[in-house]
């Protein structure tokens, strides 16, 4: 018999459950990356909505760098040899406040809607809920771009579009985190979700590149194309998303959680460790969940204990106040408020800052700003790896926040020294700013949503996730708004505001950090995994 090809041997070396897990990991990654892809265009297009151009001859204009406006001294009137090429109503002296209002309208609606989204999401099928949100988000993202083609200059039109888009995008985060939490247990959750959370940065990078491609020629397409992508991914979600392993009878769902996975009638508990045949060493608990009976790594019936469910049926969804009583939810929520304030200020204002400081046009600034997100990918993964190794989520976040504040000060000074300095500081700042944000919104939220105090109630994850991210979104709304108000008086003031926000985020974690350091194993979600209490 001929030997199997190497590719086929690779495929059959993984179990059915492992392939399904990998599929859900990739699918949810792409789904939420498309959400962030559609949020990025507004920051790229800002430089085009308000700009000046120098006349060369009749019918021809040459874009002048927006950096001619001194970064710390606002200029209200163009020089005599320049022509105002701005898009009304953003051609006024208060254009920075108007652009900040667009950010604020989206993010404020997102923050308010997030508190409701988790509660609604716990009570509706995730696949339908997420699909409807993605289709609506695609429609309203594209609607903003249609303002270019239909020559719409009403500020109210753009604000209302942003508000509705912010509301419908709240369907995304609780849905994908809940789905991923259903498929992956706690083992190596920081690493898994750290890698997975890079969808934020990947979406931002793709959004910047797509929007930047059309920003100087037809900025309407900078919104329409991302909107079409989000809507298309919504159809993919409807056709392929599997909410829970039990929906396709995956055996791994029986031991996905150590202390009480609920299936409506029984709870399942991992009783003892599985040993490999060739090495007398216990497997990692997460590997035990992945492996099926394949002749080499059997999971015998004696490894699972079937216990009666507490109530004889599925538990009711947790209330809002009940979720707030979970230890650590309030502290991490308030920490995320300030951490997300910093992150979203960079998300919405970084291209304009680069334009002002480094003498680049809107497209070049958009492309350069993607380096912040590249740094964010490494920061999120690094935070997950460190927190898994130390089993200290709060301490990991605290360390990165402590380093982020002086790094932001260095950014504000060194980035003015040239393009090379800007690139270096973008990468470093992206890692330190995005690390805590990524860890709290993924691994920490999943830990708290499966906290031992819930006694196996699997209906809490979306509500806890929505509370944490909703509170963070309040900061996300305030950051760009404050940046719009402070930037006319100088970019230095914006960076001072960001440093203060980082310090506040750290302060809210002090109690949890002290608890982790004095009582190992008492971190968010009790990270000493598979240990009976």
Image (cartoon, rainbow, N blue to C red):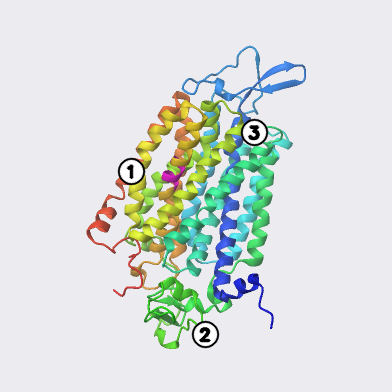
Q: Quadrant of residue 307?
A: bottom left
Q: Do tag 2 and tag 1 residues touch (Cβ < 8 Å)?
A: no
Can you see residue 155?
A: no
Which residue is at 36% across, 47% downward?
400
Depicted 56 relative to depicted 509: above or below: above
Q: Are marks 2 and 3 in contact (CB under 8 Å)?
A: no
Pair 2/1: label in front: 2
Q: Is residue 441 magenta?
A: no
Q: Residue furthest top?
A: 80
311 to the left or right of 12: left
Residue 137 percent across, percent down from the top left: 62, 51
Q: Residues within 10 Å of mark 2 (few under 14, many from 20)?
A: few
- Earlier along the polypeptide chain: callout 2 or callout 1? 2
User: Would you name the residue on which mark 3 appears?
Assistant: 154
- Dot 3 falls on a residue whose secondary structure is loop
Which one is earlier in the sequence, the residue at label 2 or at label 3? 3
Residue ID for mark 1:
402
Q: Farthest residue in the left direction? A: 518
Q: Is residue 255 left or right of residue 215?
A: left
Residue 182 location in percent, x, y? 49, 69
Q: From the viewer's perspective, is residue 217 above or below residue 381?
A: above
For this rendering, which residue is in front, 340 or 528? 528
Q: Which residues are magenta?
A: 429-434
x and y, in percent, of residue 337 in the image: 40, 47
Q: Earlier in the sequence, mark 3 or mark 1?
A: 3
> How far across and down, in percent of the image, does residue 181 sit?
47, 66
Mark 1 surroundings: few (<14), some (14-19) or many (≥20) residues within 10 A: some
Secondary structure of the residue carrying tag 2 is loop
Q: Which residue is mark 2?
A: 295
**Position of 340 relative to 418 (above/below):** below
* Residue at the right extreme, as displayed: 58
Say which element carries label 1.
Answer: helix
């Amino acid at each position: 018999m001929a030997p199997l090809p190497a590719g086929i041997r690779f495929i059959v070396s993984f179990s059915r459950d492992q392939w399904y897990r990998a599929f859900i990991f990739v699918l949810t990654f792409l789904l939420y990356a498309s959400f962030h892809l559609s949020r990025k265009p507004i920051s790229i297009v800002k430089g085009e909505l308000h700009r000046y151009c120098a006349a060369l001859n009749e019918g021809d204009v040459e874009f002048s760098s927006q950096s001619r406006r001194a970064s710390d001294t606002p200029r209200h009137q163009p020089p005599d040899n320049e022509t105002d090429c701005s898009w009304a109503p953003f051609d006024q002296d208060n254009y920075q406040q108007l652009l900040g209002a667009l950010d604020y309208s989206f993010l404020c609606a997102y923050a308010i809607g997030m508190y409701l989204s988790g509660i609604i999401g716990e009570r509706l099928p995730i696949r339908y809920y997420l699909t409807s949100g993605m289709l609506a988000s695609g429609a309203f993202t594209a609607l903003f771009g249609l303002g270019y083609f239909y020559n719409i200059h009403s500020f109210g039109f753009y604000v209302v579009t942003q508000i509705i888009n912010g509301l419908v995008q709240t369907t995304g985060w609780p849905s994908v985190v809940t789905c991923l939490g259903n498929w992956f247990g706690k083992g190596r959750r920081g690493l898994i979700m750290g890698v997975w959370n890079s969808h934020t940065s990947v979406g931002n990078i793709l959004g910047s590149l797509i929007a930047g491609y059309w920003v100087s020629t037809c900025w309407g397409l900078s919104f329409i194309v991302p909107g079409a992508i989000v809507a298309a991914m919504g159809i993919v979600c409807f056709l392929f998303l599997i909410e829970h392993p039990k929906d396709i009878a995956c055996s791994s769902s029986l031991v996905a959680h150590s202390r009480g996975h609920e299936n409506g009638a029984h709870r399942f508990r991992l009783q003892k460790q599985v040993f490999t045949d060739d090495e007398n060493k216990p497997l990692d608990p997460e590997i035990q969940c992945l492996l099926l009976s394949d002749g080499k790594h059997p999971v015998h019936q004696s490894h699972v204990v079937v216990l009666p469910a507490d109530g004889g049926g599925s538990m009711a969804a947790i209330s809002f106040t009940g979720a707030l009583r979970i230890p650590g939810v309030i502290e991490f929520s308030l920490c995320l408020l300030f951490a997300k304030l910093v992150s979203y200020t960079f998300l919405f204002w970084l291209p304009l800052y680069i334009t002002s400081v480094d003498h680049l046009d809107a497209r070049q600034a958009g492309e350069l700003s993607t380096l912040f997100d590249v740094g964010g990918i490494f920061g999120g993964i690094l935070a997950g790896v460190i927190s898994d190794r130390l089993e200290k989520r709060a301490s990991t976040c605290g360390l990165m926040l402590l380093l982020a504040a002086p790094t932001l000060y260095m950014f504000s000074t060194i980035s003015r020294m040239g393009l090379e300095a800007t690139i270096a500081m973008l990468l470093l700042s992206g890692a330190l700013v995005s690390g805590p944000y990524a860890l709290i919104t993924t691994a920490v939220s999943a830990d708290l949503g499966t906290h031992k105090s819930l006694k196996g109630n699997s209906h809490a994850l979306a509500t806890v996730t929505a509370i944490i991210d909703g509170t963070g979104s309040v900061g996300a709304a305030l950051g760009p708004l404050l940046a719009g108000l402070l930037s006319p008086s100088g970019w230095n003031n914006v960076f001072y505001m960001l440093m203060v926000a980082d310090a506040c985020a750290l302060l809210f974690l002090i109690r949890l950090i002290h608890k982790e350091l004095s009582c190992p194993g008492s971190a968010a979600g009790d990270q000493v995994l598979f240990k009976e209490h």
